[in-house]
Image (cartoon, rainbow, N blue to C red):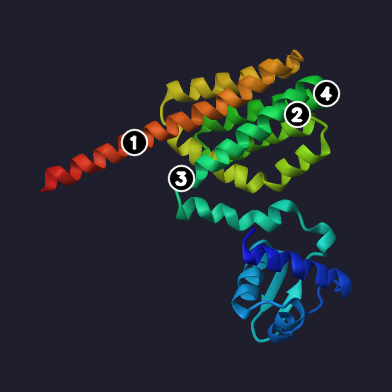
Amino acid sequence: MKVSDKVVQRLRLLIEKNNVQVGERLPAERQLCEQLGVSRSSLREAIQQLITAGIIQSKAGAGTYLKQLPAHWSQYQIVEPLSGLMDQDPEYRFDVQEARMVLEGGTAWYAAQRATPSDLINIRQCFEQISHFQALGDDAHAAIADAKFHLAIAEASHNLVLIQMMRSLFDLLQDNVMLGRRKVYTTPQHFEQLHDQHFEVMDAIERQDSETARKAACGHIEFVVQRVRMIDEEEARRQRSSRLNRT
């Protein structure tokens, strides 16, 4: 765990201990450093992390104020700055995909066992929305629908921990889906393949075939990973060739 993450946790405990309410001002920076036993740079990094997550608010010349009680802080809000790593390190998105494979393989497996009729309707509606927005050429809304499709499957697992994990990482998932779609959804052939993969996951869940659902979910994500890597390699080769041609 990074130092700033540890400071976030200490700050959370301090807020709970002092019963700070939404809208109230937090102690001054020097006082917080003393109470938390941390350096000013570590505190500032943690504060910025919470500001980015929308948990606290900094008002110029007026101090820092609490926007959400610790009880309402979600796992995603604490890790939200991780989404910026995809801009800083392109390889980070593959770590996200690997994590998705582990998590979503499990949610699909349980969804096949536990999905209710309303869960199945929700999954199918999300599936149809992906196709609808894709046909319109609306990549932004198609990515949202894509992420919602995976979230709907998690909700159908009726495992509260898995659901909370997926909800907490929803924006990170959406960013990851958008990046993958920019790479893979470049030809009708790829769209059809991904459409079929989504259908296979949904169909297995509807048929209550847990193992097929798990394999289909993992296979879908693995396909995206491999395609993105291939496209990246092709782009790198073209760039190298272009540089050679200019010399």
- Residue 237, quarter of picture: top left
Q: Which residue type does callout 3 highlight?
A: Glu
Residue beneath disc 1: 233
Q: Which of marks 2 and 4 is nearer the N terminus?
A: 4
Q: Which of marks 3 and 2 is nearer the N terminus?
A: 3
Helix, strand or loop under label 1 = helix
Q: Earlier in the sequence, mark 3 or mark 1?
A: 3
The residue carrying pointer 4 sits among few (fewer than 14), some (14 to 19) or many (20 or more) residues within 10 Å by Cα, namely: some
Residue contact at pointers 1 and 4, CB within 8 angstroms: no
Q: Which of marks 2 and 1 is nearer the N terminus?
A: 2
Residue occupying the far left of the picture = 247
Residue contact at pointers 3 and 4, CB within 8 angstroms: no
**Front position in the image: 197 or 75:** 75
Residue 160 horizontal side relative to residue 140, left or right: right
141 above or below 118?
Answer: below
Residue beneath disc 3: 91
**Residue 220: x and y, percent?**
56, 25
Q: Which residue type does callout 1 highlight?
A: Glu
Q: Which residue is drawn at 50% across and 26% down?
A: 223
Q: Which label sits in the foreground, 2 or 1?
A: 1
Residue 20 horizontal side relative to residue 182, left or right: right
**CA gap, disc 3 to disc 2?**
33 Å
**Residue 124: x and y, percent?**
70, 24
Q: Which of marks 3 and 4 is nearer the N terminus?
A: 3
Residue contact at pointers 3 and 2, CB within 8 angstroms: no
**Residue 159: x and y, percent?**
82, 34
Q: Which residue is drawn at 18% across and 46% down?
A: 243
Residue beneath disc 2: 122
Residue beneath disc 4: 114
**CA gap, disc 3 to disc 4?**
35 Å
